[in-house]
Amino acid sequence: MSLLECKHLSKRFGNTMALQDVNLTLPRGRIIGLLGKNGAGKTTLIKLMNDLLTPTGGTVLFEGAPLGAESKQAIAYLPERTYLERSMTVAQTLRYFATFYTSFDQEKAQRLLADLDLREDARISTLSKGMQEKLQLVLVMSRKAKLYILDEPLGGVDPATRDYILDTILQNFAEDASVLLSTHLIADIERILDDVILIDKGQIAEEASADELRTREGCAIDDYFRRRFKC
Amino acid sequence: MLKKLMRYDLQWIIGKVLSYYSAATLLIALLARVFHALSSQAFFLHLLEKIFSGAFISCGIAILINALMRSLVCFRSTLYGDPSYLTHTLPIKRRTVFTAKALSGTVSLMFALAVSALGLAITVLTRADVWEKAKELLRQRGTVSTLLLICAAVVLQLVEMHFSAVFGLVLGHRREKGRIPFSILYSVLIYFAVSAVVTGLLFALSLLKPEVHALLTQPLSTQEMFKMEEMRFLLAVGTVLYLLADSGLFLAARHVFCKGVDVE
């Protein structure tokens, strides 16, 4: 059984069709890149996979069942924006995650935070946006999930931080789990991808293994992307 | 999960702001009472009593408004704002999430109401003259049950106000892309519609009993009010109707919410 499946998934916002008849299957144990230009529908698709949007048509199934409390226990999602309660301290936030997510490894989170020199008594409101994003990444990667969905984890960060983020992802995702990484900074993540999903104008333009795509096109995925979606 | 989520929501709503407000309200109530006891000794003490009594009334009302507003801000922020990215990805059923948010607001309102009532008791009930009158009233048959029914009616009307606002927010988000003016409009319309239905039903029922109907159309004193069997009947029916209306509002709002959200 596949990990996650989208069947004829569509989403309309007013007169705009953000996503149209998307059929997609995410296998287990793979790092998958969801690649597309700005406004291609990456975030809409990810939000639908996380029950943050209601589909106009179609369904999302996780291990064969509709999204619900059980699937949310197994999916770790990192959105592109900061969502933590600003009045809480870092320690309170860790406790919050430990309260609700049974697979949350608090010791691992504390270890990762110590690497960042982040004090647990610091209030979220006193942290910079970059630090809050790192904290969110730590919280997500400290869960033993079956699927990690990371929306633009590299957006707006310096190259050194990008390396830190990628290393954190690679070293911390659970065995047999899959990672769905959405980004338009392809060059930075290309080396870690197993599979690639190209999305354009709300439709899946291509699904392939990263190696297969590179061999077939005779170039890096980044170059292929630039050539294919040239404005 | 309901309890855990409610614990965090209550911490958010009540938190430091309502705790300080409560302490200030009770302190002002106490000062008003102290200056009342001393008011006969000097004019400035009498003046202080009036100032603190006024301040207590303001605080008592403000804490209720504050609790209602904070409940609604918490509801909107955690279900439709940036923090909703976390709320909707928690491994909790959607109906449980809604129940926790709505009930946390209600509990906060009850907390604020209890603080206001306690303040009122400190300021007014501890006065010897008022206490004598209260004792006299309490000795009359049926006073306690009438008082309890009045309390229930007040609580249920506050809950109606809260649930109408919650339903308005849910509808405003679902139908009008979360635009606040529409949410407010929906809330006000729902509140007045439900109040009109309850009042209309009460009036219609009173037509079956002329003594009860007279209560709605003729003025009567407080003393008479507590004595009357008809008043208790009217309050009891009103309480049941408000209970039904509040339950209906809660279930309708939850039903619409469970159809799904569109978080920006």
Image (cartoon, coloured by chain):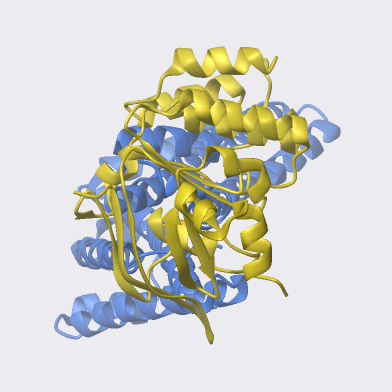
Measured as percent of width and height from the top left, residue B54 is found at 70, 46
Q: Would you say residue A47 is visible in this rendering?
A: no
Question: Measured from the top left, where is residue A12 in percent x and y?
Answer: 47, 79
Q: Nearer the viewer, residue A154 or B40?
A: A154
Residue at left offset 24%, top offset 68%: B241
Q: Relative to A163, is A50 on the left or the right? A: left
Residue nearest the viewer, comparing A85 with B85: B85
Q: Colour of chain B?
A: blue
Give me the residue at 35% from left, 50% from top: B151
Lateral position of residue B131 relative to residue B24, left or right: left
Residue B76: x, y in percent? 53, 56
Question: Which residue occupies the foreground of this view, A188 or B38?
Answer: A188
Residue B178 makes an appearance in the image: yes
Q: In the orientation shown, which residue stands out farthest toward the right?
A: B44
Tell me what hue chain A is rendered in. yellow
The reply, left or right, for residue B200 in relation to residue A196 is: left
Image quadrant holding the C terminus of chain A, namely bottom right
Number of disc labels:
0
Residue at the image point whose x is 59% and y is 26% from the top:
A167
Residue B91 in the image: above or below residue A100: below
